[in-house]
Amino acid sequence: MNLHTSVQYLKGVGEKRAAALRRLGLHTLGDLIGHVPRAYEDWQNITPIADAPLGAPVCVRARVDYAPVEHHIRTGMTLYKTRVSDETGSLAVTLFNTGYQAARLRENEEYLFYGKITDSFYAREMSAPQFAPVSEARLRPVYPLTEGFSSRQIESLVLQAMEQAGAQIVEFLPEEILTEYNLMGRAEALRAIHRPADWEEARRARRRLAFNELITLQLGLRLLREGRAGSGATPLPPEPAMEFLARLPFEPTQAQTRATREAAQSLSEPLPMRRLLQGDVGSGKTAVAAALLHQAARAGTQAAMMAPTELLARQHHETLTKLGLEPALLIGSTPAAQKKAVKAALAEGSILLIVGTHALLEKDVRFADLALVIVDEQHRFGVEQRNQLTVDSGQLTVGVGADQSVNCQLSTVNCQLSTVNCQLPHTLVMSATPIPRSLAMIIYGDLDISILDELPPGRTPVETYQVSSGYRARAYNYVKKHLDQGRQGYIVCPRVHPTESADSSGTPNKEDEAGELSSAKQFYEQLSGGDFAGYSLGLLHGRLGAKQKEEAMRAFAAGETQLLVATTVIEVGVDVPNAVIMVVENAERFGLSQLHQLRGRIGRGAGKSTCILISDAENEEAKSRFAIMKETNDGFEIARRDLELRGPGEFFGARQHGLPPLRLADLATDAELLAETKRAAAAIAENDPDLALPEHQNLKKACEKLFSNKTC
């Protein structure tokens, strides 16, 4: 067997169980070896029964006083009870529906028991503990799971994979890097991460594997960036963009002018632009995008603007049309005959500008001369989809001239990493999620960055208040006052219903167990027949189908709905200047940056807008979050403070930023390691920027595997 052997050939797996493992992304022995634990249970720290704390995981070493006794308490439920003892005391042990496990406990033999201890009137008890021979006193890994597998079973398969193929694990870091940064060897680290001798070895193994992720991330992004040198792009004269900006019916901000000049200059180069336009909600990104679209059209080339939803695409189409451009529109609901005509016009080059959704990625969409792609709310697409429109990966053929087309037939990353000589369009991706520039340089390492750090004049900051649930009635009356004046508003809830989500092990999250948390569905029904009876309410949540979501937002944007009851799906949405009031229920359940994004749905006109955060939370973290929300409307300042409070989870989640998944490294908490890997990557790239030397071939493959979401 080798690292590429299917997991189904391991003992005890087979085809059916291999299919279950594939749900975890575990296809090969290499995948299993790279499936690192998410935590450890400490079976080394043995606690005497008398000293064991209540309600916390603990490991005791105890002798079985008598063989477990079977008890039938109801149909389908069987208990097995025994008592275990050490020199300090005894403990009742109960197992549930596990006769085969109970049979393993033999009278007068010692075992390790791991679990939580409770105290009853009769005795201290450990219910459903894990147990093992005393020789297993070690750190035991806890793995991300899928249905049908326990953590112990995954551990057994990982050890099998290590025995069968571990000798084939190659080292890809140069010896001088290992020495300078005091790193374990790669094979040693993979062994130690699964079966560490102690906490220090686990720490060292994690550091080495996190180092792997960060250095391959940075080298991979560097290769993506420098790979443009092997590709050409159509130079677009920059003057039309600045002329367009000067003709706008409003005075652009200095930030808009600066960002437009930066991007327009990049478009005039023969190398494909890859640029991130980052700006807070309402900072005027669309005006910059319009200027660049005009620049492309004036050069006689084609340009496309892609949005994540039909409603946002329609809004962009309407805005660009009002600004004097003439874009076509291609979305999923476009009638078939019209779609056919638009696609034909794109292929022959008679349509220069188009706005669309994922419909632009359909296989039969071809451009005669696509020179510029703009992707709005890029975090909704991710790095693979944002590039799918710019490098043909089988979904879109990018035309070069009227009768020639380039079809690289390579994945986006491989095309760029291999510096294939493709003609590529320029790309601008836009994001309304502010990120501190220092981290943005890492997150978007394959892009140049332009920042809109000021708002257009006339914008009134949203007033933000936090109240307890005892003031809910007064808050609702305040909302009704605005609705009666012809205004609109939102009520935001953190989830759909109490059992919506679970963690990776299948255990319900804490918020799901808290029945008092608000539910969008329940709230909608309660408000429709209660506090807001007689008003027009809409409902929007993530479990609605795409068409239902679009219709709910369309009705709200059109003014047909006065009050929208919603979850975070309105975090990125359309511009509704008439929406001036928002209530966020259970506000402590949202991160700081997420609260700011939600608040950005109001305050989009010149009038006063108000955001009311309802929460009974008393913890310091929640209080700090609310204080910051009341103090500032500056998204970049909020992003900086959010990193200090919570780390990057709220806006660096894998589903948002589009980076390859990092299993161990954390872009906020591993700041020192990030700096070390940046230095190490720079040292390697200085001597071998393309990773072309023989000693760097394994490292280059590791970069490609990270970006293709593979492991060993």
Image: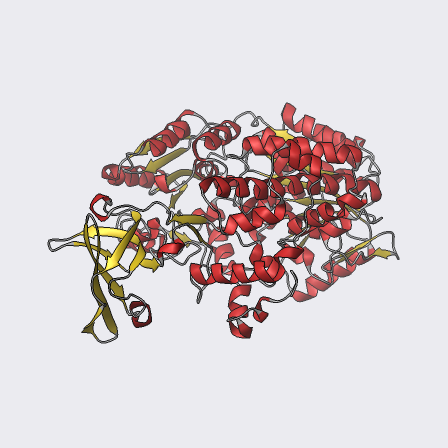
Q: Compared to 174, does 128 lie above or below? A: below
Image point 56% across, 27% down: which residue?
455
Instruction: Please give left or right for residue 550 compared with residue 126 in the image.
Output: right
- Say which quarter of the image contains residue 63: bottom left
Image point 48% across, 59% down: which residue?
155
Image point 21% across, 51% down: which residue?
118
Residue 270: % across, % down: 84, 38
The one of 240 and 103 positioned closer to us in this rendering: 103
Q: Compared to 77, does 256 lie above or below? A: above
Residue 438: % across, % down: 60, 29
The one of 123 and 395 positioned closer to us in this rendering: 123
Instruction: Please give left or right for residue 243 compared with residue 518 in the image.
Output: right
Residue 451: % across, % down: 63, 30
Residue 253: % across, % down: 62, 25
Q: Quadrant of the N terminus?
A: bottom right
Residue at the far left in the pictured view: 121
- Say which quarter of the image contains residue 35: bottom right
The one of 475 and 427 positioned closer to us in this rendering: 427
Q: Can the viewer see residue 290?
A: no
Q: Compared to 353, does 646 lie above or below? A: above
Colour basis: secondary structure
Q: Quadrant of the C terminus?
A: bottom right
